[in-house]
Amino acid sequence: MTIQCPDCKSPKVHISRLFSLRDQLISCLGILAFRCDNCRRRFRARIWSFSEYRYARCPNCAGQV
């Protein structure tokens, strides 16, 4: 599962800081805030998939390890 920006479709994204308590609570459900490196848009995306639940994810880039 590759995370892409919904606007420019770029795969160059990074995890954004979790500013609010709401962001932190939503992240517990596997939905993280990302920021696109190209257009600088902030968006949320699900990082967990039922087919990939057995695999670990990198905490910095959310890629599978």
Image (cartoon, grey):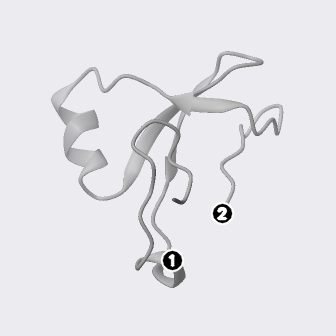
Q: State the image quarter where residue 23 is shown.
A: top left
Q: Is residue 31 above or below residue 42?
A: below
Q: Is residue 36 above or below residue 46?
A: above
Q: Are marks 2 and 1 in contact (CB under 8 Å)?
A: yes
Number of numbered discs on residues: 2
Question: Percent position (x, y) of residue 24?
Answer: 22, 37
Q: Residue at x 66, y 15 (%)?
A: 40
Q: Amino acid under label 2? A: Met
Q: Residue at x 71, y 37 (%)?
A: 5
Q: Where is mark 1, residue-wise?
A: 52
Give the SS element for disc 2.
Answer: loop
Dividing the image into 4 quarters, which one contains the N terminus? bottom right
Is residue 42 rendered to the left or right of residue 31?
Answer: right
Answer with mark 2 or mark 1, whichever residue precedes in sequence: 2
Q: Which mark is residue 1?
A: 2
Q: Is residue 13 above or below residue 56?
A: above
Question: Percent position (x, y) of residue 27?
Answer: 30, 46
Q: CA distance from mark 2 to mark 1?
A: 9 Å
